[in-house]
Amino acid sequence: MAQTDPLYIFLTLAAAVTGLLVLVLRAKMPPFFALILIALLAGLALGLSPTDVIASIQNGMGGVLGFIAVVVGLGAILGAILEHSGGIQALADRLGSGSSKSVPWKMSLLGTIVAIPVFFDVALVILIPLVLRLAKSLRRVALYVAGPLLAGLAAAHAFIPPTPGPIAVAALLDADLGLVIVAGLIAAIPAVAIGGPIFARARYAAELPMTDAVSAPDTIESKSSNGLFAALAALALPIILVASGTILKLSLGEAAMPPALVFVSHPFVALLISLGLYYIYANRALKLPASDLNTASMKALEPAGAVVLVTGAGGAFKQVLIDSEAGARIAEMAASMNISVLIFAFLIAVLVRVVQGSATVAMITAAGFTAPLLQVAGISDFDRALTVVAIAGGATVLSHVNDSGFWLVSRYLNLSVSETLRSWTVISTLVGTTGFLVALVLSLIF
């Protein structure tokens, strides 16, 4: 069977995915190591010379990391300073107040806002005392409050830059980050509503007897109750700058854009401006020592570094598929079967997500397979952004026992495995599927 035969290419790539899953699940190999190894072996199997394989891996890593490393690093530092300064707690305290009927919607909003600069697990740990306190005061099970919060965390983490997932996929697919923000926000709104307040009020709205109410601390100390608006501004500014630049570029044309606006709307500069202003505010107005802020920032770069390396390895795998022309053959097969690029991307992400658990690995793998299709499909820039949303949706669904987030939710909410499957797994599936369906509908309309 020739190396250019579509069937041979399909079988090789199927073996590559299977090998990746075996290495990560069975051999417990770090995803970065596994992705690089599979990219190397797949390139050789697909006909690239050893020298060309090395060059593809190097070019793929470099092309992705030149963008993703800066954005993820700056976003991680901003999130760390917001957490250390009490800005996140100030948001939680303000949005946690109000009537019982409004609490699920406010918690969804809180989860969506907080997850933009902060990793999912960190955000959950920070906010869980608030969840327990509200559940106790409302005489509801914890999931009445936690479910909407989890939906917001999951949706923002999947769909809205500058969270690492959509940034990584956007970089791999060469999608405009401003359009990804717009598409992600559009998809996140119904995804959060359906997976959060609507689901929670349908399943967990009944009041508990006083003796059965969940126990929680009566008070939660906030480092800064005056930092609400500063925290909101720090979160909103980079999103507004990047999205505004993209919208003006589409309406005026790139040539008519003032150079200063092009400069400040770039993700690097937008994040630097927001980070710099909030750093000064935390140091001067909140009187936080620079040494403490720097220590918090350095700690935040540890998990960010793992995301960056895995994304770079995904870029290497993508480049191998492109340079070997396997991606073009996949695209021809998909076109002959009339499979939508969005559906293809979503299904690949779902497959990897269900089998091995990690949303990040599912996103990177699906993006690597989908990127070559986009090169020959000739789709619009907005459809490219919608493909990012579709991949993120597929990588969000069906969180179960092989996902670390599943056990984090189970532990902090004191849920059994079956209870977590009936709650968090359903929430993640509603969020991911709704986001994908929104992207699919938008692709048909525009």
Image: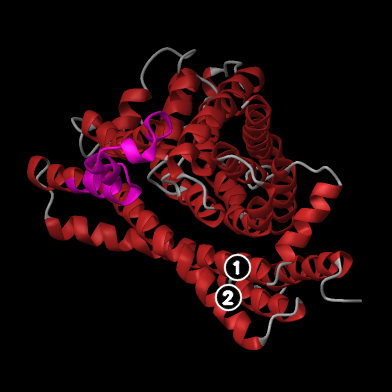
The x, y position of residue 273, in whole percent, is 22, 45
Q: Where is mark 1, residue-wise?
A: 319
The x, y position of residue 169, in whole percent, is 55, 52
The x, y position of residue 247, in whole percent, is 40, 31
Identify the magenta region: 249-276
| Rendered position, 145 above or below 49 | above
| Rendered position, 365 above or below 313 | above
Q: Main secondary structure of the magenta part?
A: helix
Determine whether label 1 and label 2 are within 8 Å by CB: yes
Question: In this view, which residue lies farthest toward the front?
Answer: 255
In this view, the residue in front, 225 or 191, is 191
Q: Where is mark 2, residue-wise?
A: 56
Horizontal side of residue 380 vs 15, given as left or right: left
**Image point (48%, 37%), residue name:** 179
What is the spatial separation of the Cα atoms under label 1 and label 2, in whole angstroms? 6 Å
The x, y position of residue 303, in whole percent, is 43, 61
Horizontal side of residue 127 vs 367, given as left or right: left
Residue type (three-letter) at the residue carrying disc 2 = Ser
Q: Is residue 91 magenta?
A: no
The C terminus lies in which quarter of the figure?
A: top right
Residue type (three-letter) at the residue carrying disc 1 = Gln
Residue 370 figure quarter: bottom right
Q: Is residue 14 visible?
A: yes
**Image point (64%, 78%), residue name:** 37
How crowded pointer 2 is (Cα within 10 Å; few <14, some 14-19, many 20+) is rated as many
Q: Which mark is residue 159?
A: none
Question: In this view, which residue lies farthest toward the right?
Answer: 1
> Mark 1 or mark 2: which comes first in sequence?
2
